[in-house]
Image (cartoon, grey):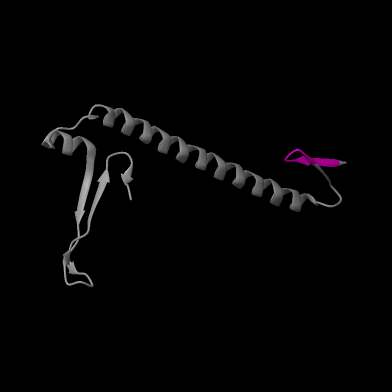
Amino acid sequence: MQAVYCGRLFPKALFPKQGRKVIAGQFDETVKTIFTKIEETKEETDDARRWVDLIQKYSAIDEFTDLLLNELIEKIVVHQSWKDGNGKTVRDIEIYYRFVGKID
């Protein structure tokens, strides 16, 4: 007698009942992981579509208004200033856009 897992035939003699349960459990976990990754990818794709739809409204920006800022930007992080090697004061600023996050 043979058992079928993942489209392959495994002789039951090589995989006792306990072993078959382990393989089936591993298979179930792999399937769950794959479905989780698919869902994450779908969410990322949906966010990218929402970003494209939103940014198309502002394809020719003449001025930076409050409405534009609130609609496009999720948050702005301003870091403490520091001196670079030439003695110039530098301040890092990170902009996190709505739906897509920080773009480097």
Residue 50 or residue 83, whichever sits in front: 83
Considering depth in this image, is 50 or 27 the residue closer to the camera? Answer: 50
Res 73 → quadrant: top left
Give the image location of residue 16, x and y in percent.
80, 52
Q: Residue furthest front?
A: 86
97 to the left or right of 3: left
Q: Main secondary structure of the magenta part?
A: strand
* Relative vertical location of residue 89 with respect to residue 29 in this rendering, above or below: below
Q: Quadrant of the N terminus?
A: top right
The answer, for residue 81, to whether it is visible in the render is no
Q: Residue at x 11, y 35 (%)?
A: 65
* Total labels drawn: 0
Measuring 31% from the left and 28% from the top, which residue is drawn there?
53
Magenta residue span: 2-8
Q: Is residue 3 magenta?
A: yes
- In the image, taking residue 98 as reference, residue 12 lies left or right, namely right
Observer-nearest of 57 and 96: 57
| Image spot of residue 56 (x, y percent) | 28, 28
Can the viewer see residue 99? yes
Compared with 95, 58 (above or below) is: above
Pinpoint residue 18: horizontal percent, then vertical percent: 75, 53
Residue situated in front as seen by the camera: 3 or 54: 54
Q: Would residue 57 be counted in the magenta stretch?
A: no
> Where does residue 52 sit, x and y in percent of width and height?
33, 31
Q: In the rendered view, does 40 fall on the left or right side of 61?
A: right
